[in-house]
């Protein structure tokens, strides 16, 4: 260090001067000179120590501030060697700050990704204390965002999930473990962490399992609906192979075969219509339709059935709701299904009432009968495919079990909604509401 070297050189020069005085024989000045030399040496040593120690202490304080994450204050010593050290420490502080900022940014990004995941993510330490649980995990497990979570060992209420937790905390991987939590079906995957602890990932399979059940029921229902007329057709056709059948019996058997064949055709047509609507391949092309004319034209197709049952049609169409904005073909299919159901369940000599009214920003259209009605527990499900309140009667009447499902999908495709109201022995009313202007349309 150059500054210290100069101080040491100065002290050495003073000592040499004292020795020179001693050699020249100025003995009487020796005590004073020695004392002066010591004072000067001590002064020089104190100045040297202060000049070096002060910046070093400040440098030490700056290092402690860096370690604590505080903003350091770097000294200015004027000593080249210490200034070089200060500059090195300053560069180190900048690099550490940059790396810390990068780590904070990466952590924030990782947290944002985990929080946005639809899968539940839970991380715990070696003791089972939960250190991370994203919003999806809390939602799946029924915990509020501010609620304190219990330990991982007691987090789940079912034995299968607790067994999986015990396995992963013991160091084993858990793959695709399906657990049932209060009606929810979850897929649980878990892995132990290298630093001890574990991470769990929960995936909600509830809707998938529900759709699988719906698909199984749909296939079973379709198979059953097709099997019944096919069995009838095959049985009567085999009987007709016998040449000894009289003409009247043959005609009756042929009539049964035709009826069942038409029933199968209607079922297939309804399935195709429903598939086309649900898949989005059908788009409603709404336009103003005169409601009274559409109903009268459609009622003509039911004249034969209505005459047999002596069922009449009463129209209660409001002047403000005599025109409805709807796809004409869809309206015909909706009314056909609703009137067909009403006619099927209306008593002999009964009346089917079709009414319209302005409701809110749209038009409501209702079809009511005065038949046996529907029990309250069945109402939420009557718009499901193949759901029948009275399966035997519906099949005897030729229904496919798809009519109300088609009605619901067609109405909702217009941006509307459909509801059913009924009381036992008081009849049923199905009301469809259509918006005056459909979603996606613009008025001029």
Image (tube, rainbow, N blue to C red):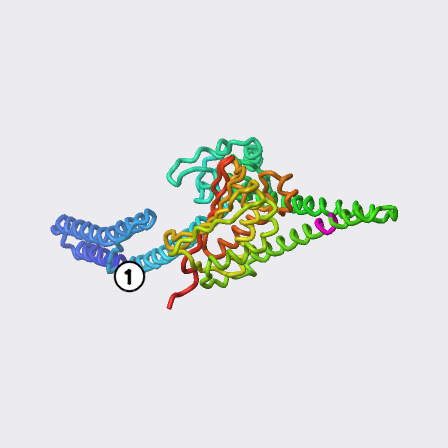
Left or right: 309, with 416 as reference point: right
| Residue in the image at 50% along x and 41% along y | 428
Left or right: 336, with 80 as reference point: right
Chief SS of the magenta region: helix
The stretch of residues the image draws in magenta is 256-260
Q: Position of residue 121 (x, y in %)?
A: 49, 44
Q: Position of residue 123 (x, y in %)?
A: 48, 41
Say which quarter of the image contains residue 3.
bottom left
Left or right: 189, with 242 as reference point: left
Residue that numbered label 1 is attached to:
80
Helix, strand or loop for disc 1 = helix
Q: Position of residue 29 (x, y in %)?
A: 12, 52
Report the quarter where the C terminus lies: bottom left
Q: Residue furthest bottom?
A: 444
User: For this rendering, which residue is in front, 284 or 97?
Assistant: 284
| Residue in the image at 18% along x and 49% along y | 38
Reply above or below: 170 against 322.
above
| Residue in the image at 51% along x and 46% along y | 352
Q: Is residue 259 magenta?
A: yes
Q: Is residue 357 magenta?
A: no
Q: Residue furthest right?
A: 243
| Residue in the image at 43% along x and 37% along y | 143
Residue 190 visible in the snapshot: no
Say which quarter of the image contains residue 22.
bottom left
């Amino acid at each position: 260090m150059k500054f210290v070297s100069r101080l040491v050189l100065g002290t050495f020069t003073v000592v040499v001067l004292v020795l020179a005085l001693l050699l020249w024989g100025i003995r009487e000045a020796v005590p004073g000179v020695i004392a002066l030399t010591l004072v000067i040496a001590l002064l020089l040593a104190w100045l040297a120590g202060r000049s070096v120690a002060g910046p070093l202490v400040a440098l030490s304080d700056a290092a402690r501030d860096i370690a604590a994450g505080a903003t350091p204050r770097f000294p200015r010593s004027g000593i080249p060697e210490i200034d070089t050290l200060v500059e090195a420490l300053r560069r180190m502080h900048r690099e550490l700050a940059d790396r810390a900022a990068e780590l904070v940014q990466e952590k924030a990004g990782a947290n944002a990704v985990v929080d946005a995941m639809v899968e539940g993510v839970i991380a715990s330490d070696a003791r089972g204390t939960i250190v991370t649980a994203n919003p999806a995990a809390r939602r799946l497990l029924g915990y509020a965002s501010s609620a304190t979570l219990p330990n991982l060992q007691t987090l789940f209420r079912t034995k299968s999930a607790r067994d999986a937790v015990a396995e992963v905390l013991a160091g084993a991987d858990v793959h695709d473990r399906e657990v049932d939590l209060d009606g929810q079906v979850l897929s649980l995957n878990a892995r132990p962490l290298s630093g001890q602890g574990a991470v769990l990932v929960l995936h909600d399979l509830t809707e998938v399992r529900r759709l699988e059940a719906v698909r199984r029921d749909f296939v079973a229902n379709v198979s059953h609906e097709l099997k019944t007329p096919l069995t009838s057709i095959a049985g009567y056709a085999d009987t007709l192979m016998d040449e000894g059948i009289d003409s009247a019996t043959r005609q009756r058997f042929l009539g049964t075969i035709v009826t069942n064949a038409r029933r199968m055709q209607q079922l297939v047509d309804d399935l195709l219509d429903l598939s086309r609507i649900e898949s989005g391949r059908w788009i409603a092309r709404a336009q103003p339709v005169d409601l009274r004319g559409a109903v009268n034209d459609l009622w003509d197709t039911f004249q034969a059935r209505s005459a047999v049952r002596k069922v009449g049609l009463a129209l209660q169409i409001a002047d403000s709701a005599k025109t409805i904005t709807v796809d004409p073909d869809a309206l015909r299919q909706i009314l056909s299904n609703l009137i067909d159901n009403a006619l099927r369940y209306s008593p002999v000599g009964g009346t089917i009432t079709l009414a319209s009214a302005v409701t809110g920003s749209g038009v409501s259209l209702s079809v009511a009968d005065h038949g046996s009605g529907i029990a309250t527990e069945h109402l939420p499900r009557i718009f499901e495919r193949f759901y029948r309140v009275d399966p035997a009667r519906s099949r005897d009447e030729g229904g496919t079990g798809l009519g109300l499902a088609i009605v619901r999908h067609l109405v909702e495709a217009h941006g509307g909604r459909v509801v059913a109201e009924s009381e036992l022995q008081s009849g049923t009313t199905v009301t469809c509401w259509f918006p005056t202007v459909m979603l996606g349309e613009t008025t001029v």
